Image (tube, helix red, strand yellow):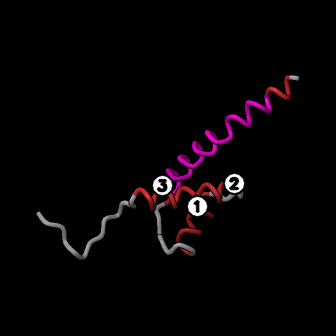
Amino acid sequence: MPKNNNTTDARPTKLELERRLDIVESLLIDCATVGDICRYFAEQEKIPLARRTIERYREHADRRIGKIMAPQREQEIRYAKL
């Protein structure tokens, strides 16, 4: 059955998803809550996203931040042991 031209695909492209994750990561670094992030997307980006979607974005962004910070954390642990 062909798609109706009046409907849009709800899933973002990979590029759009990466852009959203970058935004969420930046907001998390600034100590934003899930509610703050929901408001940001609704007001600034004009993208009303479900809370669960924002929670999944937050989890993914937390993992990205953890991977980036892992080498620095290991270095800090070595300094603390000295």
Look at the numbered disc 3 and give the secondary structure of its residue: helix
- The residue closer to the viewer here, 75 or 34, is 75
Q: In percent of the image, x 49 and y 56: which residue is there?
A: 18
Judging by the rendered image, the residue that carries numbered circle 1 is: 23
Amino acid carrying label 1: it is Ile
Q: CA distance from mark 1 to mark 3?
A: 16 Å
- The residue closer to the viewer here, 30 or 72, is 72
Judging by the rendered image, the residue that carries numbered circle 3 is: 52
Q: CA distance from mark 2 to mark 1?
A: 10 Å
Q: Earlier in the sequence, mark 1 or mark 3?
A: 1
Instruction: Left or right? Give the position of 72 relative to 61.
Output: right
- The residue closer to the viewer here, 10 or 35, is 10
Q: Residue furthest top?
A: 82
- The residue closer to the viewer here, 70 or 8, is 70
Picture disc at residue 63? none
Q: Residue furthest right?
A: 82
Q: Which residues are magenta?
A: 53-77
* Residue 63 image offset from top left, x and y in percent: 58, 42
Q: In percent of the image, x 67 and y 59: which residue is there?
A: 32
In the displayed structure, would residue 77 be above or below residue 32? Answer: above
Crowd band around label 3 with a 10 angstrom C-alpha radius: few (<14), some (14–19), many (20+): few
Q: Earlier in the sequence, mark 2 or mark 1?
A: 1
Judging by the rendered image, the residue that carries numbered circle 2 is: 29
Crowd band around label 1 with a 10 angstrom C-alpha radius: few (<14), some (14–19), many (20+): some
* Residue 24 image offset from top left, x and y in percent: 58, 58
Instruction: Left or right? Give the position of 19 relative to 68.
Output: left
Q: In percent of the image, x 74 and y 35: which residue is there?
A: 73
Quadrant in the picture for residue 10: bottom left
Q: Disc 3 vs disc 2: which is toward the camera?
A: 2
In the displayed structure, would residue 42 be above or below residue 21? Answer: below
